[in-house]
Structure formats: C-alpha cells, structure tokens
Image (spheres, rainbow, N blue to C red):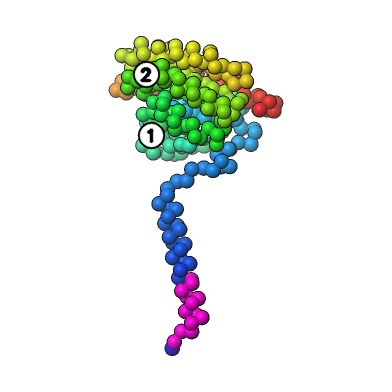
Amino acid sequence: MSTSPKLARSALSRHITVVAICLLVLSLLALGPVAPSPADAQVGTGTRLRVMAVGDSVTQGALERPSWRYGFQKRVRQSGCAIDLVGPNNVLRDVVSAAGIRPGMDHDHSAWGGRTSQMALRETSPWLPLFRPEVVIVHVGVNDITQGRSLTAAVTQVETLIRRARAANPNVAILVTRIAAPGAIYRIQTQQFGNGIGRMARRVHTARSPVVVVDQATGWNLAKLAPLDDPPHPNRAGEEFIAHRYAAAFAKLDRCDSIRRGDH
C-alpha cells in the first residue's frame, strides 16, 4: 500500500524535529556549565548579606582540609547574622564537592588553588558586577611569596581589586589579610607583604567602604596549625584559627545590623 504525500510530509517533519532537538541537546552538553546570568548572580533578598571569599587554595580548601569558610559560616550563623556566600566556584580543589562532608553549608566562593594576587584580580573582577558582594574577604599572597613575585605588585593588585569591588558596590566592606608565613623560610617576605597590605588599607579606607586588616600572622604556630609536610596550608586546627579571626573582624563591621536597620 502506498503512503499519501501528505502523510509522508508529516512523517518527515516529525523526523526533522526529533533530529533538531537531539542536536540542540548535544550542543548544550558540549558547551558545559553556563555562567550565571546577572539575574541569577545577584542573589540575596536584602535580608542576607552577600559575602565573597577571594583567594587561593587556603580559601578553596581540599578534601582533607575543607577550608576556613565553613568555620567562618558557623560562627556568623551562631551570631544571628544571615549571610549568602557568593562566587563563581563551589568546589574544593581537584573539583571535589564539599556537600557530603559539610552538608547544609553554603559552598560558593571565588578561590582556586595556585592563585597569585594577579590571578585573583583577573579572575574575580568579571564577577563583581554580577554578584555585587557587600563584604569581600581577601586572602592572597601565599603564591606570590613562594614564587618570588613582586610583593609591591601584589599589594597593588589587591588595591585594584578593592577599587573594582567598590565600582560594583560603593558600600562594600573589605577584609584584607596579613597572612601567616607559608613556611619558616618565608617569614621576612611575609612580614614585608603584610606591612604593605597594612599601609595600603589605611590609605584607601573610608567610612562608607571600610578596609580592615585581619591579622592571621600573629600567634600562628606552624608546628601546630599546618601539616609538617605542607606548611603553606592550614590543618583543621589552622582553619579554625583563620575562621575565628575572620568572624571576629566580620562582626565588628556591623553590616548585619545595618541590613536590619535598612542602611544598605
């Protein structure tokens, strides 16, 4: 029995449609993850404070040391402040998810292992206008020091990051870090970098957009707070040390109370 031209055209049309859908799905899979749109990235309802943690592997964390970010969150939550961690990354080093070992926590951040200050500036800057963080925590310098890079340039790059964060949100508060030495042989360079960060912070600080130095160096004990075979990275006790100091500095910003009052 022969098929009518009308039925043949209908069958061909359905076939073409199915093929087109399959090709579209395959093309989307090939593209991989899509960057969030501005509407998706501008999270927060005005009752949760948007906080971005910027840094290297110390901030990103790894499976055996899942980052100070979680101890920081716990302390801030216990204080009654609702925060929304934001950023383009949400995994630990080696693309390991922390969801299984830190359930119920916010995993977003802007940190990648191996980052220098220059890389942190370059890779975080495009996201600032999208996420518009209200507080930015910057922990960089370890890789600049261990790689022998210019510490003056590193301080300048942190200052540029502050300017770009302010361009995205003029009211942003910045916590910059006097980092702990990533090894006994780097103590002089680490002190030089910390002094530079301190001078820069005092110069660019404003009442509207405060820049506060968080001292993670004083009291840091390499033997107790870092693995013997990996001194640039904190162990679990070291992560709690870092989290405590960031949470204390964060509380002094008074930003959560400002949101409740409607000042921001």
Q: Can you tell which mark lies on residue 150?
A: 2
Percent of width and height locating residue 223: 34, 16
Magenta stretch containing residue 81, yes or no? no
Asked whether 171 or 79 is in front, the reply is: 171
**Residue that label 1 marks:** 93
Q: Residue at x 45, y 70 (%)?
A: 15
Residue 35 shown left or right of residue 48 in the figure: left
For the view shown, which residue lies furthest in the right direction? 261
**Span shown in magenta:** 2-14
Residue 179 figure quarter: top left
For the view shown, which residue lies furthest in the bottom direction? 1
Q: Residue at x 46, y 36 (%)?
A: 89
Question: Where 99 sits versus 225, above or below?
Answer: below
Three-letter code for the amino acid on which mark 1 is drawn: Arg
Q: Residue at x 62, y 20 (%)?
A: 208
Q: Earlier in the sequence, mark 2 or mark 1?
A: 1
Percent of width and height locating residue 61: 41, 30
Residue 201 shown left or right of residue 65 in the figure: right
Question: Where 148 sits versus 87, above or below?
Answer: above
